[in-house]
Amino acid sequence: MRILAVQNHAGTGLGQIARALAEAEAEVELVQAHEGEALPSTADGHDGLIVLGGAQNALADDEHPYLPGLVALMRGFALADRAVLGVCLGSQLLARAFGAKNLIGAAPEFGWREVTLTTEGTADPVLRVAGTRFRTFQWHDDTFTLPNGAIRLAGNDAAENQAFRVGRAAYGIQFHFEADTQLVRQWSGQFADHLAERQPDWQDRLGPDSARHGPAADAAGLALARAWVAMV
């Protein structure tokens, strides 16, 4: 199994997805697109594509001119029936790839928050493994409308479209299921200045919140990662 992983911001990383890929003995090619590394033009040579999160929005083509090419690559993988996983920004880019409207600043959400599966989500081979209702880590400002023909898999009060699927194997997941407690703590240090402005009480909340919600969220996230890798 050969997977192309695209990083859009320093320090984001694959998190629990990396563990699931290692268990499956997958070969991972990491492209640091935000650093100017070139993206392939087609899905040839890869069985799946993972697109991670980032601070930019899904329409920031002027500041990040590689985004249109990444959107086209995601669409190409999906139309070729290759597995796609877009996480946070990646989900927003997958939505864009299939004609949805990106809603910038419309759904700010941060911390461990509850997500509920739709009826279709409870039958989906990937999403169903997390349980009908579960907590997971969120960090986003933007959301999107559901792409035409997509299946809505999960939502919550902050963002109606928390997860969707296009075709057999192209998944957009808004929440950071890959971010286990360890990665959340890493981000909390790496982006401490930003969080001090946006979430001034976060450093005080981090310990209690991670103890309360982290174990179950970590377990749900790893189950999702393993289910996506198995689906590839």
Image: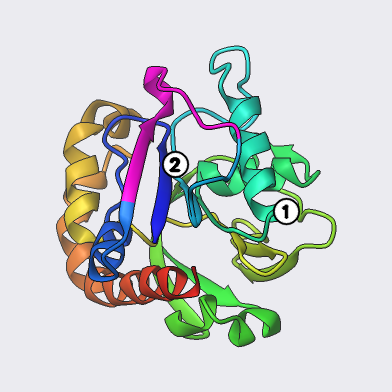
Which quarter shows the N terminus? bottom left
- Which residue type does callout 2 highlight? Gly
Above or below, 46 against 189 in this view is below
Task: Report the residue at 76% width, 56% height from top.
Answer: 146
Q: Nearer the viewer, residue 153 or 202?
A: 153
In the image, residue 40 above or below residue 17? above
The type of residue carrying mark 1 is Leu
Of badges 2 and 1, the one in the foreground is: 1
Specify how the rendered protein is coloured: rainbow
Q: Position of residue 17 (x, y in %)?
A: 33, 60
Q: Quadrant of residue 198?
A: top left
Q: Residue furthest front?
A: 45
Position in image of residue 26 (x %, y %) = 31, 60
Task: Identify the residue shown where x is 51% and y is 76%.
Answer: 126
User: Across the whole image, how many numbered discs are drawn on residues?
Assistant: 2
Q: Which residue is mark 2?
A: 53
- Residue at the top extreme? 62
Q: Residue at x 69, y 81 (%)?
A: 120
Real-space CA distance between mark 2 and mark 1, rounded to the nearest whole angstrom: 22 Å
Residue 10 belongs to the span the image colors magenta: no
Instruction: Kindly indicate the quadrant of the structure image that contains residue 177.
Output: bottom left
Tell me, yes or no, if residue 72 can be seen here.
yes
Is residue 38 covered in magenta? Answer: yes
| 10 Å crowding of disc 1: few (<14), some (14-19), many (20+) | some
Q: Position of residue 19 (x, y in %)?
A: 24, 63
Q: Nearer the viewer, residue 29 or 177?
A: 29
- Which labelled disc corresponds to residue 79? 1
The residues colored magenta run 28-41
